[in-house]
Amino acid sequence: MKSVVICGSQRYKEEIKKFANRLRELGVPIVFEPNFERQRKKMLAKAEKERLKIKSYRDRVPAMVHEHFDRIRKADVGYFYNKNGYLGVNSTLELGFAHGKNMVIYALEPEREVAEGGEICRDILYTEIIETPEELVKRLI
């Protein structure tokens, strides 16, 4: 079975963890997920634009992104947890990195419309929209 790396926004931290744990329950031996544990709950409660005003947060983010690039390097398949079609800047960087690695890339949902803040170039990088861990496992075998 192939390994998978999950990418997505900190705003979906709990949902991403639940998705990753379900993949493990279904027998996926290697599931890489973002390390959001470095962030204090108080910090995560703030909007990203507010967090970016805090120097200690800005100092940590590049290392966190670089750390996740290493997880992408090690995985066979990428899964982007883009609830409501949302991917932030860091996840978009990760998407480009995964594409450059020539990974098969799945996403939870289609990209949002441009008028709603979507990006026209991300959608073309998704191999397929996969909504559940059960569906994803079928692609990993």
Image: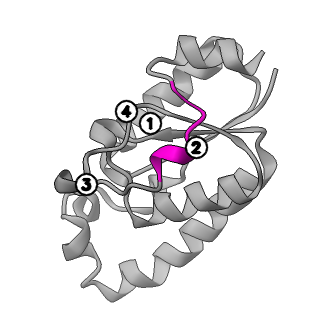
Q: Which residue is mark 1?
A: 16
Colouring of the image: one colour
Looking at this view, name the residue that lies furthest to the bottom: 55
Picture residue at 79% right of the left edge, 27% below the top: 2
Location of the N terminus by quadrant is top right
The percent coordinates of residue 77 (x first, y second) are: 71, 37
Give the amino acid at mark 2: Glu
Q: Which residue is mark 4?
A: 15
Categorize mark 4 by other alpha carbons within 10 Å: few (<14), some (14-19), many (20+). some
Q: Are marks 4 and 1 in contact (CB under 8 Å)?
A: yes
Q: Which residue is mark 2?
A: 33
Disc nearer the start of the sequence (2/4): 4
The quadrant where residue 112 appears: top left
Between the C-alphas of marks 3 and 2, the distance is 28 Å
SS for callout 2: loop
Between the C-alphas of marks 1 and 2, the distance is 8 Å
SS for callout 3: helix
Task: Give whichever of 91, 126 is nearer the camera.
Answer: 126
Q: Which residues are magenta?
A: 122-129
Q: Which residue is mark 3?
A: 114
Residue 33 shown in magenta: no
